[in-house]
Each structure stands twice: as structure tokens, then as C-alpha cells.
Image (cartoon, rainbow, N blue to C red):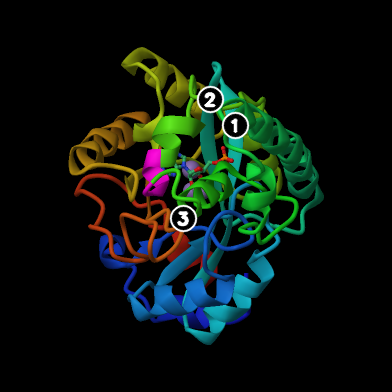
Amino acid sequence: MSTAAPLLANKLDWNDPHLINADLHCHSTVSDGTLAPEELAARAAANGVQIWSLTDHDEVGGLARAAKAAAEHNMIFIPGVEISVTWSAVTLHIVGLNVDYENSPLEKGLASVRHGRTERAMEMSRQLEKVGIEGVYEGALKYVGNPNLISRTHFARCLVERKVCTDIREVFERFLTPGKPGYVPHEWASLKQAVDWILDSNGLPVIAHPGRYDLNPMQMDELVEQFVKMGGVGIEVVTGSHTTDQYATYARKSVRSGLKASRGSDFHGPTESRVNLGELPRLPDGCVPIWDNWGKLFS
Ligand code: AMP
Ligand code: MN
Ligand code: MN
Ligand code: MN
């Protein structure tokens, strides 16, 4: 936490946390975003964000820079991370908020999750060669800001550049999702590992964009139940990945499960994101914002 945080926290009105503009999910060049941490901080501040978190995939390498930039823009900064998880044969994302990012269990765990990415990327490239698209690994590397973190997004940018597809969404649909020629299944962290790494670093585990997963309602209930038992604290309700209907669906799930509600754009860059940093609707009435008691935490 920055030393400026108590001063900043005292300026916010904690009587109605719903009115505080919190954006607790986005990506920088340290994972698969297109803006540097400093550029994200400037953009968040310009858009009125008061509590901001950077949550790069499986990586905390941008957090020190983001914290410094956030302080310069008078925002409360919440160090975050988004961990890739395999649960019930499905890939899920678990966000950790307010993590002690120099804490070794988290760092070690993330290093193990990152480890398989390069090999997976090379295999994706081999698979794409079989359908006549050559050298995508090398092409994707041009977009990678952090050699430890090559992701499907970097592949997608390369295929758009080569005009194989017109936009990133199309690349995922045609090539990078289960059953498609460039999709390589991968075993990420277990749910328990991800939750434990976050808890061990004094952070708050949050289920990211639940509406995006290929789970039936019973499986979703099972996920929430297991997550709560493991010590999970929050669930994203308002995110750039959800439709308006899903805001209501997951607000109800938040209330019923006792998981606090989170809000984050999942911003990846000015030309690639549905929702701009800080420009999200408020959380629906009735759910408890995950930041509702952070006034005490930071004062
Ligand atoms: P990876 O961690 O390498 O599997 O890549 C996952 C990332 O790909 C996500 O964090 C998103 O940024 C991006 N992504 C996944 N599905 C889609 C999609 N349908 N359209 C655009 N981006 C996507
Ligand atoms: Mn991403
Ligand atoms: Mn995600
Ligand atoms: Mn994300």
C-alpha cells in the first residue's frame, strides 16, 4: 500500500461506497494489454477512477510502476493479479485484490503458472502451420511486452496484422477457442492453489467475469460453493465481459452466496476493449461492493 493511501482514502465518501468509482480489473503491456502501467494510470485518473487495480495475467511485474503512477494521480491503488486456473476441465480466471506482491508464495506460484506458456505458444504455432498459417509464434512475439508472458491475445494481434482475420474477436472464434485449429489445451493452477496463493499474500480472491465460462447453472453453483469454502471473498458483477442482464444475474449470485461484488472494466487497450477504464455502470443496488470497508483499511 502506498504511504499516500490514508490521505487519499480520507477524501472519499465511504457512507455510500456505491458512488465511489472503483475499477478493479485491467491489463498492461506486462501481460496482454497494449498500454504501459503509467499510461493506464493516467487514463484511469482522467476517467474519474478513484480506486484502481492493475490485474495482469499471472504476473505482478507491473505493480510497483502502477503504484507509483497511481499515487501521482491521487488514486488509491490496489495491487492485483488475475490467475489462470483449470477447474472441472474449464479455464477460469481468479483475481486477487490487494495482494502483497512481494510475498513469495504468490510469486512462486505465478512463476509456475507462467512456466508452460512458451511451450504452449510454440505448440499453437505448430498447429496453425498445419492449417497453412506459418511463423505465428515469431509474429506474436513482436507484440509481447514481457518475454515470460505470451498469450493467445498476442497471437490474435499477429493474425489481424496479417489480415487473416479482421479483428481479434474473429481470431478467437476461428482459431483460438476449444475445438479450433490453434487451440492447445493447457493445465493451469488449481482453484485451491490460486485461492491459497492470494490468501497467503493477504489478498482477496475474486471470481473474474463468471458470465464468460462454459459452465451450466449447476456447475456454476458448485464453483461458487467450493470457492466460498476455500475462503473466496468476491465475485465480479459489473465487468466489461458481462451483458446488462448478466449484471443482474451475478448481483443476485453475489447476494445469495455472500460473496462481495466487484467491478472492473477488464480493459486491454483503446482499440480492443468494449468498456473504457472507469466507464462502467454502478453495481446494482443490494449487492455489497468489495471495497465497502476499505475506508477503514486505508485510514
Ligand atoms: P491466454 O491466457 O493466453 O489463454 O489468453 C486469454 C486472454 O485472451 C484473455 O485474457 C483475453 O484477453 C483474451 N480472450 C479470450 N477470449 C477472447 C475472445 N473471445 N475475444 C477477445 N479476446 C479474448
Ligand atoms: Mn487478457
Ligand atoms: Mn480474464
Ligand atoms: Mn482480465
Residue indicated by mark 1:
128
On the image, the x and y values in percent for residue 277 come to 37, 65
| Number of disc labels | 3
The alpha-carbon separation of the residues under discs 2 and 3 comes to: 30 Å
- Horizontal side of 20 relative to 284 (left or right) equals right
Label 2 element class:
loop
Residue 131 part of the magenta segment = no
Residue indicated by mark 3:
25
Q: Amino acid at mark 3?
A: His
Mark 3 closeness class: few <14, some 14–19, many ≥20 residues within 10 Å: many
* Tag 2 and tag 1, C-beta contact below 8 Å: yes
The alpha-carbon separation of the residues under discs 2 and 1 comes to: 6 Å
Q: Quadrant of residue 215?
A: top left
- Horizontal side of 40 relative to 96 (left or right) equals left
Q: Which residues are magenta?
A: 166-170
Upstream in the sequence, badge 1 or badge 3?
3
Residue indicated by mark 2:
181
Upstream in the sequence, badge 2 or badge 3?
3
The alpha-carbon separation of the residues under discs 1 and 3 comes to: 31 Å
Note whether ligand 4 is within 8 Å of mark 3: yes
In front: mark 1 or mark 3?
1
Q: Amino acid at mark 1?
A: Leu
